[in-house]
Amino acid sequence: MSDTESNIAKNAVKKIFSSFDNVTGQYRKALEEFLQKNPSIDDSQINTLFDMVGSFRDMAEQLTLHPFRLAHTEVELVKNHAKLIGATANRLVGKMADPIVMPDKGDHRFGSEDWSDNMVFDYIKQAYLLNSKAVMELVDSLEDSNTHTHDQFMFYSRQIVNALSPSNFPLTNPEVLKKTISSGGINLLDGFKQFLDDYKKNPGLLNVSMTDFSAFSVGKNVATTPGKVVYQNEMMQLIQYLPTTEKVNKVPLLIIPPWINKYYILDLKEKNSLIKWLVDQGNTVFVISWVNPGPALRDTGFEDYMKRGPLDALDAIEKATGEKEVNAIGYCVGGTLLASTLAWLTSKRKKRIKSATYLTTLIDFSDPGGIGVFINDNSISSIEKRLDKVGYYDGRAMAFSFNMLRENDLFWSFIINNYLKGEKPAPFDLLYWNSDGTNLPAKMHGYYLRNMYLENNLVKPGGIELDGVKIDISKIKTPAYFLSTIQDHIAKWKSTYKGALLHSGDVKFVLSGSGHIAGVVNPPAQEKYGYWTNNECPAEPDMWLNSATKNKGSWWNDWKTWSEQHVGEQVEPRTPGDRELTVIEDAPGSYVKLRIADAIKN
């Protein structure tokens, strides 16, 4: 293409996208007027939609300026469709024909035999897979633009491609069609009723029911480890668990869970409860149970979570046990808070934490994992506007965003089962917990998104200031155990490894099999997944893994061996309320039982 032809093409593209932007602007104005009349609707999701449209605009511009790339994809797609037509014709005359394309491993959408045995649905399935593969390979060839990243291109395209799957429509899903015929359409009526029920529970923000909520009750069949609430403030309740051993370790154990969901992921049921197991190993276990905030806590900041969370807990534990130091475990965002608290204590020259354990924790946010597709200045600015308007970030919106990182498993599968097949979701404690989310205070959430995810200030010496102190993670000398999981899409293990290298003290890094939850909540009795260990921490995570040893079973026992050097001597068991703190109520306490809708009213 000559320079003249290239300039003509570029000018044509500019005109096309100028019109595109004009139309988009008119839609944005109309939506803004609609949102003013309907304040209950989460406008941050509308802004995400516009971000997606902007991403498609950038993709279209690249493809228009590189027509041969698009042409090559189209030619290959036509060839593959010709092969598919030929294979289908062979089947029509009774000949054997190998499939032209197969679903990826782990793709459960086409698991029914009807998708392969029935020629019509087999053709529909393969045609869709050919088209979707071509689209995603084409998008994968695109580069970052000025406003969107390659990961955003892939994420938004994947959402459209998977939304258009034939499995999501009654007439092109053989399982749904068969059930509709056999039931006389009752399944679709039942599905519509369930859709209305879900919408009534979350007006303006549809969250599909993932489990039978009536099958679970916090404190009755989840979060059942015996204990007492011995301290509380406006931010958290502190639970002390009843001892189960004749002697206990002198140094108490404090667990700091994430505040983006509830602590009882570590105490779902007795057989897989990390909390119960820790108590049975002779630890005096304390757990922070965060409040579910509403508009009243809009001005609560990240440093308030530190002061009213672990710092207040340390003082309370000293009153409860007489011990000034604790061993601490931080899970996910709770681990980020633990690192921040340790850095603050180090700057203040206070020794209150004897050892630190980080479970799937990001400290270096340079690669934030799947959630990175939502991390850009435009998206965060729109979230901040929403935060300023309502005073909190709705936990249901966050749950929806996380679910869309695995949309086929955590969204569309439930759309199909609940609304198309008309089936009620089965009882599942993990999905019950996943649906029992928490809100986030406006000040804290805006600060966290900008300073951690967007600007990665936590890794910069003095980049974060908490309660008047500029903190430096690299000055932490507390012995630390880092546990990450190899399939984690929320806190990618190579990113968490970077955080481990920031510490100046003795560090042990361990990598578990599975993902963000299953790799952590992995009791030894199940003998699942396994884990990798390495006595060294080289500069690069791949170097660590290449020289690591694969072990069978659970990392729990490895952690126990590591922790024994920090637990102190054996002492008499401590019973909640036997010293300076009085019992407030039975575990799991009242804070954890507050659901999102009730928290918003406060």
Image (tube, rainbow, N blue to C red):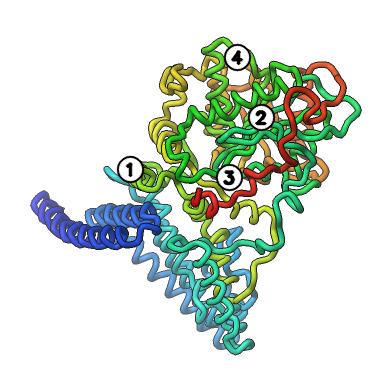
Q: Earlier in the sequence, mark 3 or mark 4?
A: 3
Residue at the (50%, 61%) spot, across then down: 202
Q: CA distance from mark 4 to mark 2?
A: 16 Å
Q: Is residue 472 visible in this depiction of the protein?
A: yes
Q: Quadrant of residue 226?
A: top right
Instruction: From the top left corner, tell me how far across and down residue 466 is, in percent.
Output: 46, 22
What residue does disc 1 label?
381
Instruction: From the top left corner, tell me how far across and down residue 321 is, in percent.
Output: 76, 21
Q: Earlier in the sequence, mark 1 or mark 4?
A: 1
What residue does disc 4 label?
477
Disc number at residue 329? 2
Disc number at residue 261? 3
Instruction: From the top left corner, tell me how far across and down residue 293 is, in percent.
Output: 52, 43
Q: Is residue 99 visible in this depiction of the protein?
A: no
Q: Earlier in the sequence, mark 1 or mark 3?
A: 3
Q: CA distance from mark 1 to mark 4?
A: 36 Å
Give the amino acid type for the residue marked by disc 4 in the picture: Lys
